[in-house]
Image (cartoon, rainbow, N blue to C red):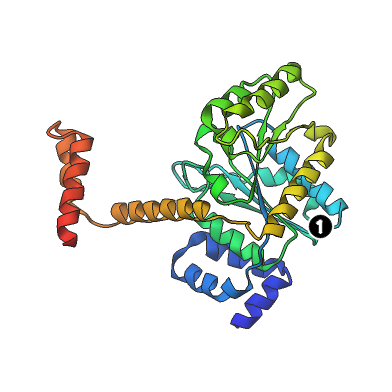
Amino acid sequence: MQHRIVTALRACDRGTLGRTISIAENGGEQASQLLQLIKPFICESCVTGLTGPPGSGKSTLLDGLIAEFRRRGLSVAVIAIDPSSPFSGGAVLGDRCRMSRHQSDDKVYIRSLSARGSVGGLSLGIARVIDVLKVSNFDMILLETVGTGQAEVDVMDLVDICVVVCAPNTGDEVQAIKSGILEIADILVVNKTDLSDTNGTLPQLKMAQHLRRNPTRQVPVVPTIATEDKGIEKLADEILKRSQSAGNTGQYEDHAKIRRRLARGIARALEERLFNQDNEMLDQLCTSIQRHKLNVDEAIRIWLDKDASRQQ
């Protein structure tokens, strides 16, 4: 049975891919067993992330990229992250509609996933889903984030190439500069360049590169009009150039990225455990804050001190 799962994944069987991705996304013991099973078969695939503010045209751009990579004979897997409801945890999963023309292509696999309320737009399950797709040995794995603006920098630790998309006339270039988005970008895209004021946006982003931690590493700024497929070929060239460079050095993932991802994962797991368990002390601290006997900082110190004494 286990051998059949791996064989089906490596053959890109759609039914097996769908089921294993659901298991990986949901986590738990079943996901751990799955990851243990597929670990020896995970390929060193390069993952490209597209991020940027909502309305910048990421989904339309991604649709054009899929078409361009297919034109070059490359197979493509896409993970499209949609915002989740704060009440039900579900998602509309609408980004997939913009890529519907590729659904019948057996060399393209598109899966929409919910952000599951994650502040950075990426749930813990995304890394597990990427591992499943790496077993299927797609030429290109593309991850489209929700587009939550300044909070969305977690993507840099999940992907090997980070494409940041913004549009003119929306203030996106200012957001990019002040929020540190320039720090995570390997490629900057100014989409919707048929709009006015494009001539102001492009120079601003190019000039702002001196603000980077490593200003000597220049990031290409690619103008596109995704709705007209303009600039898509140039963007695909830039992605493939960086993908090949990373593959040649064997450094798809570096230690710092893995460390940050591990730290965030541990923090989220501890948070989940804290809120799921029946913790009488936590309830008492909440009551004290409500009655203005403690502030939040004091309550945190009390809980940490108590927890440390329990560990001794």
The vertical placement of 177 against 123, above or below, is: above
Q: Residues within 10 Å of mark 1 (few under 14, many from 20)?
A: some
Report the side of 88 relative to 46 (left or right): left
Question: Which of the two residues, 292 or 217, is positioned nearer the viewer here?
Answer: 217
Residue at 52% x, 44% y is 154
Report the side of 92 relative to 232 (left or right): left
The vertical placement of 312 against 272, above or below, is: below
x, y (%) of residue 205?
A: 66, 26
Image quadrant assignment for residue 212: top right
> Given the image, on which type of amino acid does mark 1 rest?
Leu
Identify the image quadrant of the N terminus.
bottom right
Residue at 66% x, 23% y is 207
Question: Which of the two residues, 308 or 168, is positioned nearer the viewer here?
Answer: 308
Image quadrant assignment for residue 62: top right
Q: What is the secondary structure assignment of the residue under circle 1?
A: loop
Q: Which residue is mark 1?
A: 74
x, y (%) of residue 306?
A: 15, 52
Report the side of 173 relative to 235 (left or right): left
The vertical placement of 42 against 288, above or below, is: below
Residue at 74% x, 38% y is 60
Question: Which of the two residues, 178 or 35, is positioned nearer the viewer here?
Answer: 178
Identify the image quadrant of the C terminus.
bottom left
x, y (%) of residue 249?
A: 67, 58
